[in-house]
Amino acid sequence: MSDEEHHFESKADAGASKTYPQQAGTIRKNGYIVIKNRPCKVVEVSTSKTGKHGHAKCHFVGIDIFNGKKLEDIVPSSHNCDVPHVNRTDYQLIDISEDGFVSLLTENGNTKDDLRLPTDDNLLSQIKDGFGEGKDLVVSVMSAMGEEQICALKDIGPKN
């Protein structure tokens, strides 16, 4: 054996993949799927019968979880599809800056300042109004494939 030391340059993160493979035939409505490199929530699945050349096809209709666009894909049911790792985390809202970023309190007491206000007008006005009234607000942040966005709001009462 050689006495040389081997040095490897790691360009990947901690091995945590943004997606995982799942057989197309096992993905159901309300699950998640990657269509055209976008994480989507499945709203409709239809499976065609096996044809002359032997593959049943799954037709997926999904809605992008970040921008709400409708996307479609057709995949043989025996093939693998990418399924995004989707996480929801709740944070307490501390502040809203003038440039549209929010300051959030994490569970371990640190602040998270890299998130913009949501683009959904209804949710945006709820957050701004509640914050303006001095309420204690908890926002749910959805994250998938390296993107994060505020997707829901909870009011936990007035500030003391």
Image (cartoon, grey):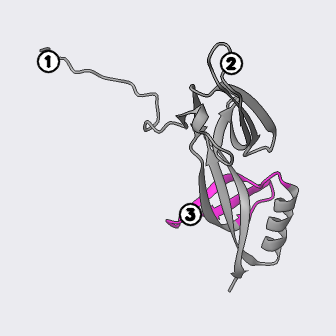
- Closer to viewer: mark 3 or mark 1: 3
The image shows residue 110, relative to residue 14, as above or below, that is below
Q: What stretch is highlighted in magenta?
A: 95-120
Question: What amino acid type is highlighted by mark number 1?
Answer: Asp
- Closer to viewer: mark 3 or mark 2: 2
The residue carrying mark 3 is 106
Q: Horizontal placement of 142 versus 8: left or right?
A: right
Toward the bottom, the furthest residue is: 160
Q: Does the magenta stretch include residue 111?
A: yes
Which residue shows up at 41% across the image and 28% down it? 10
The residue closer to the viewer here, 33 or 136, is 33
Asked which quadrant contains residue 7, the reply is top left
Which residue shows up at 71% across the image and 70% down it? 154
Asked which quadrant contains residue 157, the reply is bottom right
Residue 75 percent location from the top left of the image: 66, 26
The residue carrying mark 1 is 3
Q: How crowded is mark 2: few (under 14 residues within 10 Å), some or many (20 or more)?
A: few
Measured Cα–Cα span from mark 3 to mark 2: 52 Å
Query: What label does residue 21 carry, if any?
Result: none
The residue closer to the viewer here, 96 or 127, is 127
Question: What amino acid type is highlighted by mark number 2?
Answer: Gly
**Quadrant assignment for the N terminus:** top left
- Closer to viewer: mark 2 or mark 1: 2
Q: Horizontal placement of 130 versus 27: left or right?
A: right
Mark 2: secondary structure: loop
Q: Does the magenta stretch include residue 104?
A: yes
Mark 3: secondary structure: loop
Residue 128 percent location from the top left of the image: 82, 66
